[in-house]
Amino acid sequence: MPSFLGEEASNYDQRIRRLVPGYDLLQQLTQAQCQAALEEDAQVLVVGAGTGTEVIALAMANPKMRFVAQDISADMLNIAKQGFEEAGISDRVQCHCGSVDELEGSFDAALCLLVLHFVEDNGDKADLLSAVRQRLKSGAWLWLADLMKPQTPFERDAQFIVCQQLGLTDIGVERTRHSFEHEFYALDRMRLAELLNQTGFGTAQCYFKALSFTGYVVRCQ
């Protein structure tokens, strides 16, 4: 699991838009889904909140929602805190630098966007999903988006073509290709369904797909 320190943290927002086709659309659709599904005063856990993009989007659209922004990177959360202050939402956001296991509380929903593919499927993915589930109320919603295994022989190559069109350099493509093969732990849909069922969630429904990056919404059983 990367820690996103120093320059990795400060450059994250610029870099992620070159790596994830449709990144801003993913954020927009997630925000709209949350707004449609949740009560206006919902308590939302944001796992791997990073620089706070989804927290700010949700908070600005929903002035009564409250949030816990969790991340293991203090550098990322420091950037997020500055963004929360500038957006005027700091009084509604609690930041937690550490694991989900350390959190207390019971939430109406959780977001886990572009996080799970960094976690090995050796029990660690299940542990993270279980920790999230344990902090959600019965019937709560989870929005989950990750890099999935390619569904066609050319999907990965198409992804790199789009990334170059978005500004990723040739060196960046090679580094990303290496990361996809050796540092990311993408799932196929069947394995994701198994993990969700194992950890107390229902059937996931797709609400976003841009090549291999896929967003799902799933309810607690």
Image (spheres, grey):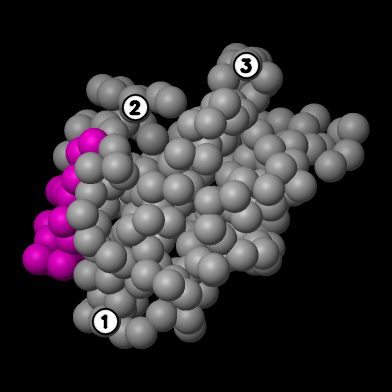
Visible residue check, residue 125? yes
Q: Position of residue 104 (x, y in %)?
A: 21, 54
Q: Which mark is residue 41?
A: 1
Helix, strand, or loop for circle 2? loop
Which quadrant is home to the N terminus? Answer: top left
User: Residue at point 87% right, 34% down?
Assistant: 154
Whether residues under marks 1 and 3 lie with C-beta atoms below 8 angstroms apart, the answer is no
For label 3, the residue is 182
Q: Amino acid at mark 2?
A: Phe
Q: CA distance from mark 2 to mark 1?
A: 31 Å
User: Residue at point 69% right, 52% down?
Assistant: 193
Asked which quadrant contains residue 25, the reply is bottom right
Vertical side of 127 occupied by 197: above or below: below
Magenta includes 25? no
User: Residue at point 33% right, 58% down?
Assistant: 135
Q: Position of residue 188 (x, y in %)?
A: 74, 41
Q: Amino acid at mark 3?
A: His
Visible residue check, residue 211? no
Q: Position of residue 51 (x, y in %)?
A: 30, 45
Helix, strand, or loop for circle 1? loop
Please rate how many residues cluster around mark 3, counting C-alpha atoms within 10 Å: few if below 14, some from 14 to 19, many from 20. few
- The magenta segment: 81-98
Give left or right: position of 148 versus 9.
right
Q: Amino acid at mark 1?
A: Asp
| Marked residue nearer the N-terminal end (3 or 2) | 2
Give left or right: position of 52 versus 201.
left
Please rate how many residues cluster around mark 2, counting C-alpha atoms within 10 Å: few if below 14, some from 14 to 19, many from 20. some
